[in-house]
Amino acid sequence: VADDTSVPALGGRVLAGEVRAVARAITLVESEPRSGETLIGAIFRHTGRAHVIGVTGPPGAGKSTLVDRLIALARQAGRRVGVIAVDPSSPFTGGALLGDRVRMQAHAADTGVFIRSMATRGHLGGLARATGDAILVLDAAGYDPVIVETVGVGQDEVEIVRAADVSIVVLVPGTGDDVQAIKAGIMEIADIFVVNKADREGADRTAAEIESMLGLKAAGPDDWRPPVIRTAATTGAGVPALVAAIERWRARGASVRRERRVWRADAWLREVLGRRFIEHLEHDVLGAGELATVVERIASRAVDPYEAVRSLLERGVASPVRGG
Ligand SMILES: Nc1nc2c(ncn2[C@@H]2O[C@H](COP(=O)(O)OP(=O)(O)OP(=O)(O)O)[C@@H](O)[C@H]2O)c(=O)[nH]1
Ligand SMILES: [Mg+2]
């Protein structure tokens, strides 16, 4: 969309649930953040209805297979489902995109399901921003739930899943080392644990390891202890129990939901404010290459970073914001 005036119109079509508009809108928020902001402005007040389900876990844990099952059950319940699959960037899992497409093919002709893959690289303003905006688009278009699959390896991915209404961490049977290794990054964000590939040896042990780790964790203010659910995504075994757990989570009080939304709004505001202030400096305040010069001066010890920031803050605040 080159013409900005058409963006609000696009927003209207998204709100009407038009599939092609949804696809265009996601492309817009991915590739043209400024126009994307106008679009979000047109739809934001109509969002917040969808239940956003984050699914993360190590490469190959069976996340997409599981998501496919969740789609099928949600469709049976008559719900329209939006899915964002954030592609793993690691070359070791580079085939995942094709795999996702093939695996989710069963739903390809179903207009009640919208599946979109997003690359992890090349997003101005970051992957978490682009994914967050894409979730808003699906939410505005009436998809509910919106499922986001990420590979739980990087900070970006953790950030995405943390922003979901419910975070599901998928692990597979293996040595205790796996659970230990993953502990630092994604264990704390799990609202629900899944031990997938429970048809294989060792699922009980892995589940017990997670349980014992949770035993050390203090219960939350509303006494939610993350359930540990065994599934075999390929056969569908255990998936109804997972859906029940998701529903139990969803049925929790308004205050819990509100707390998470406030957390998310806070992260949103801080992230955008920081990024936009720097953009304001670059576009409206400083001359070409001036920021690079300040960086040089800090590196060569001509100015200290705190003094440089003080000066930039004063100049930025004193200057009118142009260019949106
Ligand atoms: N035995 C067994 N295999 C499974 C199960 N779930 C998934 N798989 C297989 O595991 C492989 C990876 O499944 P995916 O669903 O692509 O895993 P993923 O976590 O989405 O993978 P990435 O997106 O690449 O990280 C596929 O060959 C699946 O068929 C399961 O419950 N049991
Ligand atoms: Mg996958």
Image (tube, rainbow, N blue to C red):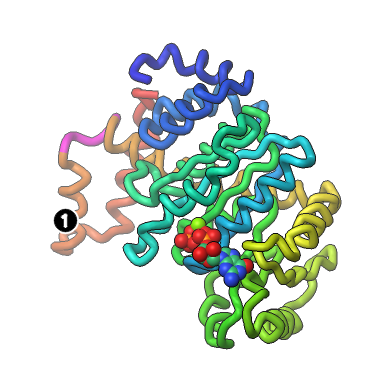
Q: Is residue 213 left or right of residue 252?
A: left
Q: Could you say where residue 240 lies in the image, as x and y percent from the top left?
A: 78, 58
* Residue closer to the observer: 231 or 275: 231
| Residue 230 shows in the view | yes
Give the residue pinned by disc 1: 297
Q: Could you say where residue 159 lies in the image, as x and y percent from the top left?
A: 53, 56
* Residue closer to the observer: 110 or 123: 110
| Dominant SS type (magenta) | loop
Q: Quadrant of the N terminus?
A: top left
Which amino acid lies under the numbered mark 1 shown in the image of this protein? Arg
Number of marks = 1
Q: Which residues are magenta?
A: 284-288
Membership of 294 in magenta stretch:
no
Q: Could you say where residue 53 lies in the image, as x and y percent from the top left?
A: 66, 50
Q: Is residue 138 left or right of residue 96?
A: right
Residue at 83%, 47% (x, y): give it.
254
The answer to which image quadrant residue 112 occupies is top right
The answer to which image quadrant residue 278 occupies is top left
Q: Could you say where residue 4 lies in the image, as x and y percent from the top left?
A: 40, 16
Up-down relation of residue 312 to residue 149 (above or below)? above
Up-down relation of residue 224 to residue 209 (above or below)? above
Membership of 286 in magenta stretch:
yes
Residue at 75%, 60% (x, y): give it.
242
Near mark 1 (Cα within 10 A), the count class, few <14, some 14-19 or many ≥20, is some
- Element under label 1? helix
Residue at 40%, 38% (x, y): give it.
276
